[in-house]
Image: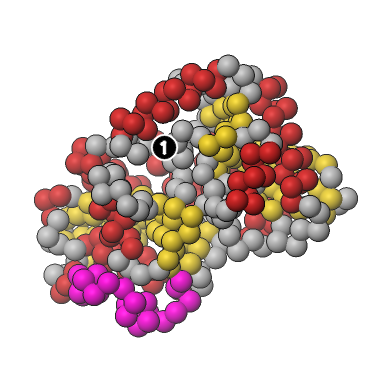
Amino acid sequence: MRIKEITNKSQWEEFILQNKESTFLHSWNWGEFNKNTDEKIWRVGVFDNEKLIAVALIIKVKAKRGSFLFVPQGPIISQELKVESQKLMEEIFSYLKNLGKKEKVGFVRISPVLENNDENLNIFKSCGFRNAPIHMMHPEITWLLDITKSEEEILKEMRKTHRNLIRRAGKDSVEIIQSAEEKYLKTFYDIHMETVKRHKFVPFSYDYIKSEIEAFKNDDQISIFSAKYKNKIISSAIIVFFGNRAFYHHGSSLSEYNKIPSSYLILWEAIKEAKKRNKEIFNFYGIVENKPKHPWAGLSKFKKGFGGYKKELVHCQDMPLNKKYLIAWLIETGRKIKRGY
């Protein structure tokens, strides 16, 4: 096996899209987005002879608590793998360790797209990884909906309240606008900041979200769904379409109009759009369970009401490289306690 950088978009995307667990966090455009926000990235492939068997998008994250290398929901491994997975992962981890030392970072962090089980956990543990204090910005418990079913079946399997609210929004003359134009992004962000104040979480900057839209829109992989009521946009959501999936990535709403169920209609229209694009799974992104005081508790109930099932991934893993890691660990642990996570 040998590891080398991949510079060809078609080669990268073709490999990623062969995997049914494909995630936009390992897409070519997610790499471009991170480059555009001044992060250093590497796209590397593992080759067995001349056959590509795994890829990893590596991002150098510069943070006040200490810089580190981050692999978001990866590495992505061939579903036709003919070499031992433990040996393959050891090769990738060794590459990351050496790159981390070369870049003088405190640790390597991986947010795996692997099912949370003892076999997968032991791979990381045996290679010197430990559980990260936090899970970064990418969820570990996700809520998924099979959208290969008919619209009638999906509606039938929803919570009854959700079905009624979707219909009520239609009767209230809520209009859903789908676009990636910047004027809708500006409106989304204004509503987003109101949502931030209400729920007291740390927001992404406008430029951050704008860069994300710009990275994906040329390939028609992203859209802003806006709900207009009485000539005013009152809620909005950003949906990413990649591989066989659609992802509910950002959402916001105005508390002044919380009696108008526009957010329910937005996601229903997003699900229908995903079906039109021949997607198989609608990924509602992160949820929490059995944590009624968690900031995501209400949002999790909202997502689960559309029907579907949960998938739990391996917790974010850290490989400490030097004493700088302790500083980051202490800061992140403090944040976790403060935010009630």
Which residue type carries mark 1? Tyr
Main SS category, magenta section: helix
- Residue located farthest toward the right when viewing the structure as drawn: 49
Q: Is residue 252 magenta?
A: no
- Residue located farthest toward the top when viewing the structure as drawn: 323
The residue that mark 1 highlights is 208
Quarter where residue 41 is shown: top right
Residue closest to the eye, 288 or 220: 288
Residue closest to the eye, 212 or 148: 148
| Residue 135 can be seen, yes or no | yes
Q: Is residue 163 magenta?
A: yes
First to last magenta residue range: 146-167
**Residue name at image x 58 percent, y 22 percent:** 106
Residue 227 horizontal side relative to residue 185, left or right: left
Residue closest to the eye, 69 or 93: 93
Figure colour scheme: secondary structure
**Residue name at image x 48 percent, y 23 percent:** 328
